[in-house]
Image (spheres, grey):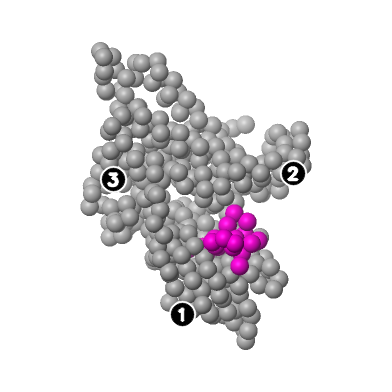
Amino acid sequence: MDFHLPDDIEKLRIKTRQFVDTHIIPLESDKLAYDDHENINLSLLDEIKKRVKKEGLWSPQMPSSRGGLGYGPIGMSVLYEEMNRSIFGPVCFNCAAPDDGNMYILNKIGRDDQKLKWLDPIINGDVRSALAMTEPAPGGGSDPSMIKTEAIYKNNKWIVNGLKWYITGAGIASHFILLAKTNDGLTAFLYHKNQPGWRIKRRIPIMGPEEHGGHCEIEYNGLEIPDENRLGEVGQGLKIVQIRLGLARLTHCMRWIGLSKRSLEIALDYVSHREGFGIKLADRESVQVKLGKAAMDIDIARLLVMRAAWKIENGSKSRQDVSMAKIHVADTLNNVCDTAIQLNGAKGYSKDIVLEWIYRYARQAKLVDGASEVHQMIINRFFNKDKSDFWHWGIGNDI
């Protein structure tokens, strides 16, 4: 098994890391760099995006024919990890959720005319997007088959009524992918923010810092969507969402590894200089144990993510691998950040450094795109089906 990175990916990794270190991480200590919801403010983001494009680092996950760099999951794993060493990183490279997953599915299954209208503006960074899927109980959450929002076909249009919530980025999104119930199952649709028949009821307050556009509750009251703006076939919406979420879950993991590494970098720097009772913290065995455990967990996370990325790039759905990565990386992010705060003491708990930001952000990792318990059930399903063959090498029967 060869873990050597191709030269082009390694060169781009180094370039991305240097860009993050030079142009993005320094912004974290500037209060004026933040918006009201603790993310990079939009005017500053526009400046950084221009620099990213000039450096040839924009949209690495999209085809070069559409303005991206043409990298698959392997290259994405390497680059996303470097981008998210800064809390502001991914959005600066057009690699943040939910745009990342939306671009992926539009590129994969959209018609050519749909790509021109709905995908290319996202790739270019001209608009942001959102996926409207999750609903309050008794509607669909981790189980999309429970979705209640309904689309009824009439006169070559779909009339949509229902309620969605926790729709990430909806507050600033222009392009939406909507999942609704139709006679033949679930169907995916595309609509623009300027269409009548829908409204944002509220931006839901959350525990941690927010993505641009927040997490919104949306009401549909007669939204009309032309049939030409249906994404994929009628009744294939669940399949479409599963395709999107498979890689999207893994890209979350890629980014969370970056935050985990940054947390440990901050901790190592602090304990290497801080002295107490006549000895540096880094020389204490108890501190070394904490750092060693955290470093090991991060590397396990990287291996799990890269294995899943390799399988996907070679034609596998890799569902159990993605689920294992999702659980372990979410736990690692929470544990490593907690360790880093503990080692930094009061400084780690303060807003003088980004650890408290990462700590609050990290908690949602165990919930988004399927709670950890749901992914454990998925792993168990594959284990019960494959039994001892569950631990095979290579792609096996994952395709």
Q: Position of residue 43 (x, y in %)?
A: 28, 60
* Secondary structure mostly taken by the magenta-highlighted segment of the chain: loop
Point 66% across, 44% down: residue: 377
Point 69% across, 73% down: residue: 183
**What secondary structure is found at the residue carrying circle 3?**
helix
Q: Amino acid at mark 2?
A: Asn
Q: Write the start and end of the magenta stretch as one range.
A: 129-148
Q: Amino acid at mark 3?
A: Glu
User: Is the residue 354 above or below the residue 166 in the image?
Assistant: above
Calculate the distance from the C-alpha at mark 2 to the C-alpha at mark 1: 46 Å
Which mark is nearer the camera, 2 or 1?
1
User: Is the residue 356 above or below the residue 297 in the image?
Assistant: below
User: Is the residue 159 above or below the residue 181 in the image?
Assistant: below
Residue under numbered circle 3: 28
Residue 243 forms part of the magenta stretch: no
Q: Amino acid at mark 1?
A: Pro
Which quarter of the rendered picture does the N terminus lie within? top right
**Position of 136 compared to 344: left or right?**
right
The mark that comes first in sequence, 2 or 3, is 3
Q: Position of residue 243 (x, y in %)?
A: 62, 56
Point 40% across, 35% down: residue: 337
Res. 58 visible in picture: no
Calculate the distance from the C-alpha at mark 3 to the C-alpha at mark 1: 38 Å
| Numbered label attached to residue 397 | 2
The answer to whether mark 2 and mark 3 are in CB contact below 8 A is no
Task: Please tell me how many numbered marks the rendered image carries.
Answer: 3
Residue under numbered circle 1: 196
Q: Position of residue 333 (x, y in %)?
A: 46, 38
Residue 147 forms part of the magenta stretch: yes
The mark that comes first in sequence, 3 or 1, is 3
The mark that comes first in sequence, 2 or 1, is 1
